């Protein structure tokens, strides 16, 4: 509901033919979250856990520390068993979070800001990544800059994604009008196939859906997010305040686990690709390419959220009309769970299963 209203107020032009397809996809995908936990991907040796928590994520590398924490909680001596629950789009994540069917999830930062603005009691407790998103166009297209996308269809994962915000920043830099590009919203997994089919001309999303287009020979990178917005972030760990108040020690376990998982993934990139492939239900070689071909492509350190990081995103959202008021940073961020010293998660790489043939 809120997305439709904000789209209208923002005056963002959507291509009618594409909207029809997206509407059908939305109806099929927008189902309430059911079940108390995720399907078990890995079973481990940890016998210390006496409680569990389901944490939502999308199969993008911006959320990679979620399944790594899931794995670590099952194979180390943690007190909490974290079950990662994969979603395919953000509307479904919002539905589950608002209903408290999940009380912790990875989410695009502007969407968390919008939920807080609308009175949903959530807080950002940690970041998911730095960088890790690209603008992708057809491999053989004549598009060489943003100006060449004038009148074209460009997909983003949500109007409340930082990808959408950054593209609008770039449009301002190029003195383009907000209506010069036809923005469409697509779930990240649908973007490469939509580009290949000619349904869209470009997309801006988190990995590995950019690398997949490259490796499949259907797309090429037009812009790296870091070149437009240095130290780009799109997603954060968002926790419902009810969980923060009722089980702060569990949230402490979660944030520590996410932080340690990021430190481990930063120095064990090939192993991280192998670990998360079954959680993502994706080809390990695509994830390995993202994580190892260029370490600058995505980073999992320096992830404590700062007022400056989020204020910059909020400023862009306000200028676009997608956010309507400022939220005090102490209402938006809760940094008390971030550990003073972040060590690598003690993951035994020998316990990471080999891909099934």
Image: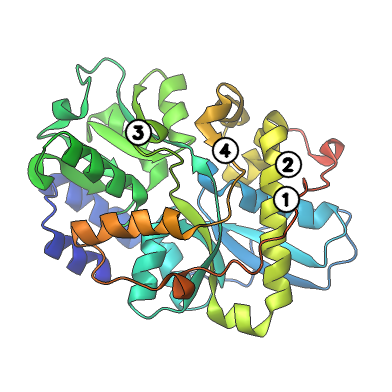
Callouts 1 and 2 close, C-beta under 8 Å: yes
Q: Residues within 10 Å of mark 4 (few under 14, many from 20)?
A: many
**16 sits left or right of 31 in the view:** left
Quadrant, the C terminus: top right
Q: Residues within 10 Å of mark 1 (few under 14, many from 20)?
A: many
> Could you tell me how far apart the alpha carbons at marks 4 and 2 are, in whole angstroms?
11 Å
Q: Position of residue 307 (x, y in %)?
A: 46, 60
**Disc 2 marks which residue?**
264
**Disc 4 marks which residue?**
299
Q: Position of residue 154 (x, y in %)?
A: 23, 38
**Disc with the residue nearer the chain's start (4 vs 3):** 3
Q: Secondary structure at mark 4?
A: strand
- Tell me the residue at 27%/54% (across/down): 316
Q: Position of residue 253 (x, y in %)?
A: 73, 66
Q: Secondary structure at mark 2?
A: helix
Task: Name the mark nearer the viewer: 4 or 3.
Answer: 4
- Tell me the residue at 82%/44% (across/down): 347
Task: Name the mark nearer the viewer: 3 or 2.
Answer: 2
> Could you tell me how far apart the alpha carbons at marks 4 and 1 are, in whole angstroms?
13 Å
For residue 139, say whether it is visible: yes
Q: Secondary structure at mark 1?
A: helix
Q: Secondary structure at mark 3?
A: helix
Q: Position of residue 288 (x, y in %)?
A: 61, 28
**52 sits left or right of 214 in the view:** right
């Amino acid at each position: 509901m809120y997305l439709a209203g904000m789209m209208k107020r923002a005056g963002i032009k959507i291509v009618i033919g594409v909207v029809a397809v997206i509407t059908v996809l939305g109806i099929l995908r927008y189902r309430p979250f059911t079940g108390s936990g995720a399907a078990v991907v890995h079973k481990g040796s940890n016998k210390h856990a006496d409680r569990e928590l389901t944490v939502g994520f999308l199969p993008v590398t911006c959320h990679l520390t979620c399944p790594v924490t899931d794995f670590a909680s099952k194979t180390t001596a943690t007190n909490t068993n974290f079950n990662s629950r994969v979603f395919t789009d953000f509307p479904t994540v919002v539905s589950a979070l608002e209903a408290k069917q999940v009380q912790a999830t990875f989410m695009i930062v502007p969407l968390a800001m919008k939920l807080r603005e609308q009175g949903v009691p959530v807080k950002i407790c940690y970041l998911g990544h730095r960088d890790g998103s690209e603008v992708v166009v057809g491999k053989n297209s004549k598009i060489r800059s943003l100006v060449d996308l004038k009148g074209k269809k460009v997909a983003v994962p949500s109007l409340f994604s930082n990808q959408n915000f950054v593209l609008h920043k770039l449009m301002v830099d190029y003195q383009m009008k907000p209506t010069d590009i036809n923005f469409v919203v697509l779930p990240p997994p649908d973007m490469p196939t939509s580009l290949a089919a000619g349904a869209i001309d470009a997309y801006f999303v988190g990995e590995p859906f950019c690398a997949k287009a490259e490796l499949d020979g259907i797309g090429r990178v037009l812009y790296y997010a870091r070149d437009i917005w240095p130290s780009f972030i799109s997603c954060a760990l968002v926790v419902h305040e009810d969980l923060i108040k009722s089980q702060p020690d569990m949230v402490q376990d979660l944030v520590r686990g996410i932080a340690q998982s990021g430190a481990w993934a930063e120095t064990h990139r090939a192993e991280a690709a192998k670990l998360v492939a079954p959680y993502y239900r994706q080809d390990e070689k695509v994830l390995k390419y993202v994580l190892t071909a260029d370490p600058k492509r995505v980073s999992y350190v320096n992830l404590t959220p700062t007022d400056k990081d989020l204020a910059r995103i909020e400023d862009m959202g306000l200028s676009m009309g997608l956010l309507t008021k400022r939220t005090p940073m102490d209402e938006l961020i809760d940094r008390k769970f971030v550990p003073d010293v972040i060590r690598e998660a003690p993951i035994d790489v020998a316990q990471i299963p080999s891909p099934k043939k």
